[in-house]
Amino acid sequence: MRKSQKTLIVATDKSVFFVDICKAEKNISVFSQPLEYINVNGIKNDFAIKTRRNHSKTLLVVPDHWFKHEFFPFQSNKDALIKVFLERKLKTAYPKSPFVSQFLSYTTRQREVEHRGISAFYLEEENGYRLHEALCKVGLSPQLITTPALLWAVKFKSLLPDFAKQPALIVHSQKDQAFLYFYCEGDFFFSRKVAIQEGNNESLVFEINQSIYLFSQKAKKELGCIYLIGDETTCIDILTEAFGKLIHILKFDSQEVTIDKEISFLQDLLTLDGISSPDNDHGVTHRRIQQQLKWRPVQWAGILIGAILLIILSAEHHWIDRVSDLKEIGQQEPKTGLTLSEYETALDELTVHAKRPSSAFVIAKIVSSLSEFILLNEININLDTSILELTATVHAESIDSFRQQLKMFAQGLNTKLKLPRPISLEDITFQIDDVKNSTGKLHHRIAFKVNLL
């Protein structure tokens, strides 16, 4: 059985790339859709089905400039105070964009008293919000959104302990272009893409000079070291001569991975093992999904405990019935034999009983059909009549998203429970609950009853 892996989706200003990695065949296939088309029409269903197959968590990589990084002086390191402070700042800065505060992450910087504060970064690009919503509608909700610069920061911090102690520049050199990433003590500042003419690296030196000047103004510090990813000897000599600094050269095993030029910034980050998912300090998660991930272990624990109790009670029920039957048989006069019709009746009863699914089996299949937007409220299984009754709460930001979640849930139950009559949307009743979630959207309460046999 193929092991599940992270779903990788990469966005640019023009396109969205769905990356499918087949390690066995040493192949990475990429299929894409124009970003403008997705923003208007949503993601094609065949793209979503192909991407979801045999995958679990979704990692979304977006351009660096879709994020904004800021440092705020702040003395306290209490999360509750920090969140209130940042939300107030963002609402003031983006009064017409309430989604900004939903895509926020931060780290505290407890240095000298006068330099204590919060290093915050958040998604500010409108295309990012629209893409996130489109992915959620087809069951590809990103559990983390990150950028190439943040991915490089994670990689360098794990490889080079000194990287997070000084201002640094990473030059990711390729055949006809280079990507410049500036960091100060591990925090990302800004990045640039530079076109390089064949045999002419003067433009690269010029652009680096301009960028270093901008970096010194923003960071109030001089650049400490330069790291070069690539093995172009000419580029190394020119940079050493131009800046008078030791150039640290790093080579990574890309396992001969070739990718589309539009996402060439992932070269040396993407391998046949995929991309290592960064921690929460190097990416953001939508606040609603954060809450769902936080409560998911509690929900699973409740379902597991309920299933165990149900199995124990079912076993006790059958044992009591068995003891009662044995007592009745002991009190009856022995029969010399059974007639043919009695044999047939007993065989029919045994066949019906064998066809009945166990409670644990039904619960397991229901849970595996859930998406992160559906929370179970109550499950009732009548083993005698083989009737399943279920109530749940669906979190959706629009009626289209609500219908899509119901459709996917119904399809999952039909497939996994092999129901005699498939569930349709008409079988599901729903009402608007009077409890709102943190984004102000209403929950939708659903219920349905089906025959298992």
Image (spheres, helix red, strand yellow):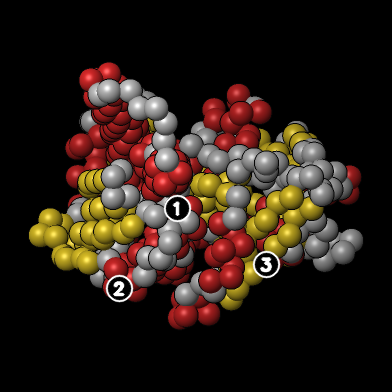
Secondary element at tag 1 = helix
Q: Nearer the viewer, mark 1 or mark 2?
A: 1
Is 227 placed left or right of 140 in the picture? right
Q: Residue at x 60, y 50 (%)?
A: 54
Query: Residue 293, position in %: x, y?
Result: 36, 42
Q: Nearer the viewer, residue 54 or 435?
A: 54
Query: Residue 428, position in %: x, y?
Result: 27, 66
Is 277 placed left or right of 207 in the picture? left
Q: Residue at x 65, y 57 (%)?
A: 19
Quadrant where the N terminus is found in the figure: top right
Q: Say what amino acid the circle numbered 2 marks.
A: Glu
Secondary element at tag 2 = helix
Q: Residue at x 35, y 27 (%)?
A: 335
Quadrant where the C terminus is found in the figure: bottom left
Q: Say what amino acid the circle numbered 1 marks.
A: Leu
Image: 347 above or below 267: above
Q: Which residue corresponds to mark 3?
A: 31
Image: 336 above or below 84: above
Q: Which residue corresponds to mark 2?
A: 426
Q: For the residue carrying disc 1, how many other residues have a C-alpha within 10 Å: few (<14), some (14-19), or many (20+)?
A: some
Is 175 placed left or right of 361 in the picture? right
Query: Residue 176, position in %: x, y?
Result: 80, 62
Q: For the residue carrying disc 3, how many other residues have a C-alpha within 10 Å: few (<14), some (14-19), or many (20+)?
A: few
> Label 1 vs label 2: CA separation?
19 Å
